[in-house]
Structure formats: structure tokens, C-alpha cells
Image (cartoon, coloured by chain):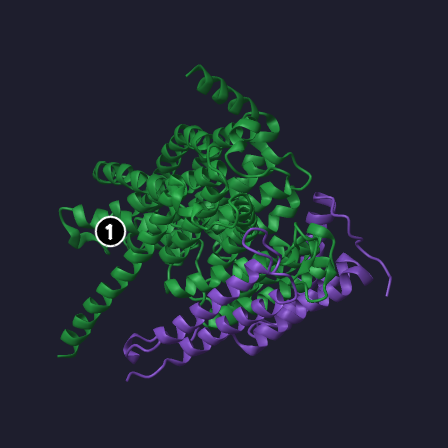
Amino acid sequence: MTDLFSHIALGFSVAFSWQGIWWCFVGVTLGTFVGVLPGIGALAAIALLLPLTFGLEPTHALIMLAGIYYGSNYGGSTASILLNLPGTPSSAVTCLEGYPMAQNGRAGVALFITAIASFVGSIIGMIVMGVASPPLAALAMSFSGPDFFSLMVLGLVAASMLSSGSPLRGVAMIGLGLILGLVGRDLHSGLLRFSYGVDELYEGLPLVAVALGIFGLPEIIRNAGKIMPRRMKARDITFRSMIPTKDDWQKSRGAMLRGTGLGSFFGALPGTGGLLASFMSYAMEKHIAKEPGRFGKGAIEGIAGPEAANNAAVQTAFIPTLTLGIPGDVIMAIMMGAMIIHGIQPGAAVITSHPDLFWGLLVSFLIGNFLLLVLNIPLIGLWVRMLSIPYSVLYPFIVAFICIGVYSVNSSVTDLYVLLFFGVLGVVMAFLKFEPAPLVLGLILGPMMEENLRRTLTLHRGDYSVFVTRPISAIFLTAALLIVVLTIWSAYRNRGKRDMAQESAAE
Amino acid sequence: MAQLNKIDVLAGLFVILLGVLSIVESLNFSMGTTRNMGPGYFPFYIGVLMILIGIGIILEGRKPARYALNFGQLPSLRGLLMILAGVIAFALLIERVGLLPATAVAVFLGSLADDSTPMLQKILLTIAVPLVSVLIFKLGLGMSADILRWRL
């Protein structure tokens, strides 16, 4: 127990330093900014700003990058409520009740409750992270090669099966990611693989260029020249209009706590994250409501629950990344890439070997969420005005920042061609309905998987059965298998249901 | 028998092609044994896996047409070409003429992707964006690239 207190004290000393507070402030402000603006997400923002953190202490770099991530979640709901355009995918649910509330003249209340729910979810998620991570990391210390390999299989299976779209397509993109992860010098033989004569790729594909190419460029290409609907007039949100009624409070309180519970749990599972948690929270609130008829017309529980869920999930998503070295989603994968660039190998050893980083980051969430409360309640008018910037003005800035950002990582023109290649790949993938997220996960995990597989099989004389005879590894593989079976089963069942629905509709 | 769905066939072929590429590349290296894996081992088996997945995706399209996925929307050709041209121009220019002109050309080409805005706006952006970028990246963040240089 004294241990925990001394750790928390360490965290406070790191996070409450001037630099800690400053980088946290920069992160959450930028996060809110990119969250509010539709068309540039947290992922692109983090990838863009990653090169800028090279000069910082790793702890400050992570504090800032994490701030962008959870800050964008606060901001994302603003566009959802006011424009019915989700700024981030996980705030899509907030449109369902938030936009009707805005149309009823209750935008202020919706924004206020969103901020409070996000805050509650984040803080509880943060506590869960602080309590759950050390024992989990201690457990992970006893993992060996086969266990890690199986854990990565589980993470990738979960990510592909539970993400949106067809599971087979998800697996295909993971496979492509694994292949792309092999690009560069093979550590055992020193040979260059998949470099096709481009020797500059010996260190592997540059992560920033890949991420911006596959997520950033197609987005711009798709949206440039499209007339964006419903431009916002700078409607003023007065502080008075934000104060919820007693009834609003009563309805939201339980929803926030239930949402936080769902979010904390699903956030910590690899591959699921905030999107699933927020949808589940919405479904749950609708299910237990006394008058479900209010949903879709501006039911406040429908914002409070999902927003709390989504933010709690963002915090607990750090648990697998920092304790197991397995990223739960793409943003965590990029975050892991950032740690590796800063010379910190993510995994069970982070908490013990870099306690200042882990606890400092944890405490910075506290600071960041307080700052976000200030940014999102008294200063909401500022962000609302920002919504009126037209995309045609915005996107040339994004093009320039992407080019410069990618180039600045290694001062390498090759990286720009990698950006271009993945931009085109991203357009092709969108045309064929492939999701880019599993690809990036595969890309990050690919080299680690190969390494663990090789080492394990060398140690066990080429005997594959070690993966099922070691209990920890067997548990992970069983869980992965279970997810596959459940996915196939539910797809089959839903198809049956849809069949009936289609037929009865046809009659 | 239900017909194959075009998008699934194309998507499946795409995945199979990637698998074949992976296998072809893996053949350049020794496979090794399971006990001592060579650099060709992992890519070979992932390639095999990709081919199987690709076949799976094609067959997935064998369901009745009413469940069919539709092709994603293709972006406008103008948007695609102009944004890509902007990136290419930046790649060609950054080490020859420096940050400011390279960004300006990239932004101008990129702004042509949107044909609904007046030329004056494009020109203003072409002036403003590079200046802001230099302020942020060069002065604010100490990026090492030259603002202007001449090395053709």
C-alpha cells in the first residue's frame, strides 16, 4: 500500500512539473481542436505530431500524445451535437440524442452533460488503470515467448472480428499488415526483405508515413471539393443555457456510472475500444429506460452513458498497451510506435523500469481532464465558432502539414513516396471496403510476432505443440478460437433474422 | 446457384495477389526448418494464409444479391490527381528549393482539387499556408530543413 502511495506521489511530481502541465495542456487543446473539426481525427493528429515530440522527454511526449487522444473525444461530441456530424467515430452515438436536443434548443445542456459524463468516465477509468495495471504487469512478467505469441494472436483476432465490417476482410488486412511489418532488414540474417530495391527501407516502413498515407490522404481526397452540408452559424451557447435541470441530473447520473462500467471493461480488452462500448451503453440505456419512446428525440441518458463509456474506454485502453505491450486499437498502436521511437519497449517492464513514465502519465490524465472541463464548459463558444471554418480552407493546411510532418521524421524523401503509396492503397482499400485499422495493428505486431515465433520454436526444438501445452498460451488461443466461433455463429444467426425480416417486409 | 458478387471477387483477387507477392518474395530466402527458421518462413506461410482468405472472401460473395456489399464511392479523379500531385511536387522540391516554395506548390496543386472555390482563395491559401507552416515547423519546432535553398 505504501508502495502505491509513493508511486502516486512520484506521478504527481512528474505530472505537476511545469513541463508536465504545459505538454498536457498542449495535448488536450490540440485534441479538442482536431476532435471538433470534422475531417481530421485523433489518429492523423497523433501521427502528425509524433515527429514534433522527438525533442521532448519520452514522458512529456506521451503525456502530450495521450492528451490529444482523450481530448479529441471531448471535442468529437461537440460536432456530433451541433452539426450531427461526428468529429470522431466513437462520438457517432452522441449524434443520436445530442442532435435532437440541439434542435430542441437544448444544445447547451447536451454539451454540458457531455463534458461532465466524459470527465466522470475518464476519472474512473484512470483509477481502474492505476489499480489494475501493476498486478497485470506483474502477471505478464511470467509470460514467455509462446504466451506472448498467443496473446498477439488473440489481440489481432479480437481486432479483426470485433471491428466493423466483414471479419474475413479484417483478417485479410491484418495479414497485409503482418507482411508490411516484415519490410526491411531481417534481424537474424541481416537480409533485406520486401524492399524491392529501395534500400532506405532497411529500418522497416516509416510508421508515420504509413498511418498518414492510409488514414489521412484518402480522407482528404474523398472530401476535397465535396460541398460540406449544414455549415454552422456561430450560434452562441450561453453559460445559462448549459445548466441542466434537476431531472436531467437524475437521469444522467446512473447512465454515466453504467457507461463508465461498460467502457472501463471493454476499453481494456484488445481490439474493442470506445466505439463498441459507447454503442453498448446506448443500447443498454434504451433497454432499461422507463419510456424508451423518448430515445431518438433527445433523451439525455443517451448522451451521458455513451460519452462516459467512450472516455472510460480511452483511459483503460492504456492498460494492455502499457502492461502487455499489446495495443488495443490503432491509436494505441501508434502510441506504442511513439514509445519505441523514444527508446521505451512497451510491455510488462514499463511500470517497473520507467515508473516515472507510467505514474506520471496516469496523473497527467487527472490534470488533462480538469483542463478539458475548463476548455469545454466556459470556453465552448470558441470551439463552436471553429466549426464554421469551411473544409476548403482547412484541407490545404492539412495537406501541407502531412507532407512536412512525414518529411521531418527522418528528413527523407523516400518517406514521402511511402506516404504516396499508402495514400493510393488507402483509396483502393476504401473502394473494395477494406478497413485500414487492422492493417496498422498487424504492421506494429508483425515483427514482434515473428520474433516470438522464431524464438519459441528454436527453444522448443521446432515443436508447435508448446503453444497449446503451456497453460497461459493455451488460454489465449482458446479465447481467440472462442471469438472466431462466436462471430461466425452470430453472423449466421443474424443472417437468418435478416432473411425473415426481408421476407416479412416483402410480403 | 447464387451469383458471385463483383466487389467480393475483386477484393478476394486483391488479397490473393498480395499473398502471391508474399510467397514470391519469400522464395528469395531460405525457409529454414521450424527449429531454425529462415527469413522466408514467416512470409511464406502468411502468403499461403492470404490466398486462403482471398478465396474465402470471393466465396463470401456467393450469397443472394440483396446482402451484397456495394463498392465504396470512388473519389473524383480531379481530387485524387491533384492531392497526389501536391505530395509528389513536395517530394520533388523539398530538397531542391527548400520548405517554403515546396509547400507553396504542394498547397496550390492540392487546392485545385476543389473546383468550387474562387481562384483568389486558392492564391491566398498558397501564400498563407507556407508562411504558417514555416512559422510552426521551422521557428516553433526547430525543424532542420532549409526554408529556401537552391540545389537542383
Task: Using the image as rendered, state which of residue A176 and residue A124 is in the foreground.
Answer: A176
Task: Using the image as rendered, state which of residue A465 and residue A441 is in the foreground.
Answer: A465
Q: Quadrant of the C terminus of chain A?
A: bottom left
Assign a secondary structure to mark 1.
Answer: helix
Residue at position x 60%, y 60% in the image: B31
Chain designation of label 1: A
Image quarter for residue A316? Answer: top left
Residue matched to label 1: A283
Vertical position of residue A127 compared to residue A408: above or below: above
Q: Which chain is green?
A: A
**Res A237 visible:** no
Compared across the picture, whether A104 is left or right of A89 comes to left
**Res B79 visible:** yes
Vertical position of residue A491 compared to residue A25: above or below: below
Task: Using the image as rendered, state which of residue A502 and residue A391 is in the foreground.
Answer: A502
Vertical position of residue B81 compared to residue A413: above or below: below
Compared across the picture, whether A78 is left or right of A37 comes to left
Which tint was used for chain B?
purple
Amino acid type indicated by mark 1: Ala
Residue B100 is situated, as x and y percent measured from the top left of the image, at 76, 58
Task: Using the image as rendered, state which of residue B63 and residue A152 is in the foreground.
Answer: A152
Residue at position x 55%, y 40% in the image: A27
Residue at position x 54%, y 54% in the image: B34
**Which residue lies most toward the right here?**
B151
**Which residue lies most toward the front here?**
A461
Residue at position x 66%, y 37% in the image: A56
Q: Quadrant of the N terminus of chain A?
A: top left
Residue A445 is situated, as x and y percent measured from the top left of the image, at 52, 50
Label 1: how many residues lie within 10 Å, few (<14), some (14-19) or many (20+)?
some
Residue A479 is situated, as x and y percent measured from the top left of the image, at 34, 48
Residue A97 is situated, as x and y percent measured from the top left of the image, at 28, 53
